[in-house]
Amino acid sequence: MRARLLGATLLAPLGAVFALLLVVPLGIGLWYSFRVGSIFGIETTLTLDNYRQVLERDAFWTALRTSVVYGAGTAIASLLVGFAIARYVRFERPRLAGFIVGAVMLSVLGGYLVRIYAWRTLLSDNGVFNSALEQVGAIDGPLRLLFSPGAVILTLGSIYAPYATLLILAGLENVRDDELDAARDLGAGTVRTYRLVVLPLIGRSLLLAFSLVFLLAAADYVIPPLVGGPGTQMVGALVANQFLATGDTPMGAAFGFMTLLLLAFVVTLVWAAMRVLRLLPREGGRR
Amino acid sequence: MARFSDSTSLAQGVTRAVFLRRAAAAGAAVSLAPLLAACGSSGGGAGTTASSAGVALDELGQVEGTLRLMTYAGYEGGDPIKPWLRRSGVDLKTTFINNQDDVTTRLRTPAGRRTDAAQLGLAQLDQYRELGLAYPLQPEWFSNLDAMIPFFKDLVADDDGTLTTMPFVWGGLGCNYLPSKTGELTSWRELTEPRFKNRIAMIDDPVSTVQTGALAVGIRDPSRMTVDQLAEVKEFLLAVKANARTVAAGYGDIADLLAAGDVWASFQGWNAVESFAGAKGAVVKTAYPQEGTVGFVDSFFVQVGAESKGTAVAFIDQMISKEMQAYCGNDLASGIVRLDAAPLVRGPAARAFDYDRLDELFRTKLVFALDAPLRGDGDVATHEDWVATWEDVKAA
């Protein structure tokens, strides 16, 4: 009882900050989303019409689909890369853990803009990749690397994959060697050991890593237009336009809440799928 | 309009600060969109019209102290404005913007309402008049106004003889292209031809893009186009987009894409892109297609609630002085508003416009079009309709 009280007391300041900076503004925004927008202002009338308009906008659904596809693609690619790095560090070269984690952290600290333009330089028609391939005679003309879906996922992944790597590495640190030994003693091969032991033990890390990268990538509307083709309208751009270009705060809030709701639904689906596939520990299991 | 991109080099892409802001906005907009709303004012929209009738210049206050300016990087006057600032004892604090929406949005915040003077593009002139954001300017407050080309003065003059805002630079949003790849371009419709497949860069600016689309389909006054005509514009923009390789974030980006050979032409461009791409070794030209090209005029207005109106007026007067106009022509690669400064513009910037034949340029090539009205007016398409159309085109 005393420990709980102490825990609650220690968490109180954080809770207050959380409430002040997140819950209260979200509540105000939710309230605005049911109001009628005037020209760069808000009227007092209550309405559900903003949400109806959002749901009827083809552009919203197209942009949402684009955001989900790029978000999920980036999250999956980041999980694969992150898992490969984290597995290597945890099981193959644990002594290099500090160095590799440091390198990953360094890449997080690198400039956002610099990395975008670095990829543009590498991928453009006259870029490093195309020039190298042409010089060795592998191609006659430039490959369309830039302004493609692959370029979007590559660039988004290079920026957000480090977060996935750190989360997965933290999860793998909790996998004990004796658990792996027990699996092998019981006759499990490498694949079965990973499927039945390792992945369930790091399921929460995987889910957290997926959710973080997915939400960040799906919300990013800077990178896709810069390295993607003309069909990379992300939902974040639509939300921003309501606030900035048309000055319709209630409509922007409605767009924002619908997006929040639908992206949360995607994450919930992933959580449910992981439960079905037994990739998440059961309640009461080791956390 | 996202024309300027960097406080040190106009030729570069969008600044790091802009990117960071956009990235933050991306996350925040999706997950915390209401936070943005909550931080803004919930005040009403249209304002009342202020009056400056009978107000003498010295009644606006001393020219001294802090001047809070909101404008594009470079428009604050760079190094050439510094001697005047020192002489006048003015401490210039500039908030840099990426487009006109930034001004409109920030003026709603408590910090934004402390702004003394800010950027206003001609396209939004009527909107700002309707919103009551600008303090009417009396012509006699400006010692340099007599030297201004009357055309620009007339563009912003109100019925009572006051000026809503003060023009100081202008230009044309023509078609930038690589002549070595495309030959001469004479019509916007050429950009829908198969030879341009994956060779066009569009610009992510709903207002000027829709305006240019309207001119391309034969609508001479885009601001009054109907909803049906807007649908026609949308079809045309979709045809251009079918050939587009990307929708660029700014004109610096267009210059980079042309210089790298990633695209051959832009819908639409900016005369200054020639200089930007030229600095990277590329030969880029600007076409003014036969259907017409959107012209822009950038200006400064005094915010209606400004604390330092006298200082703001003095600063604006300085920006239309001969020396500062030379700076605008040379360093900003822009058109200037007084002819006596034209001989001071040299190099590539001097070749951008023929100041001896401006009448012909304005009469036959450039259309200084306004944005759509904010409120519905019969079947005339509104600003919101334009933005939604551009969103639909981008999402298609």
Image (cartoon, coloured by chain):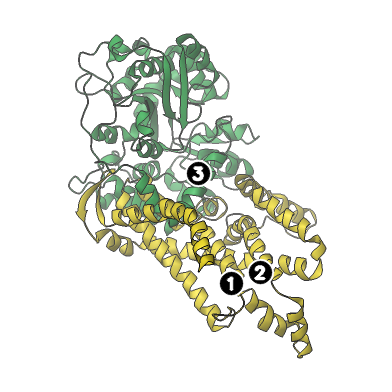
Label 3 packing within 10 angstroms: few (<14), some (14-19), many (20+): few
Q: In x, y percent, where is residue A23? A: 40, 56
The CA span between labels 1 and 3 is 31 Å
Q: Chain of mark 3?
A: B
Q: In the rendering, which numbered label is found on residue B302? A: none
Q: Is residue B317 above or below residue B261?
A: above
Q: Nearer the viewer, residue A128 or B96?
A: B96
Amino acid type shown at disc 2 = Gly
Q: CA distance from mark 1 to mark 2?
A: 8 Å
Q: Nearer the viewer, residue A9 or A209?
A: A9
Q: Is residue A61 above or below residue B247?
A: below
Residue B177 visible, this angle: no
Residue A253 falls left or right of residue A137: left
Answer with left or right where residue A234 lies relative to residue B49. right
Residue under pointer 1 = A204
What chain does badge 2 belong to? Answer: A
Q: Colour of chain B?
A: green
Q: Which residue is mark 2?
A: A171
Residue where numbered disc 3 is placed: B21
- Seen at 60% across and 70% down, the residue is A206
Q: Residue furthest bottom?
A: A187
Q: Is residue A216 above or below residue B16?
A: below
Q: Amino acid at mark 3?
A: Arg
Q: Which chain is yellow?
A: A
Residue A273, given in percent of the width and then of the height, sits at 52, 79
Q: Quadrant of residue B301?
A: top left
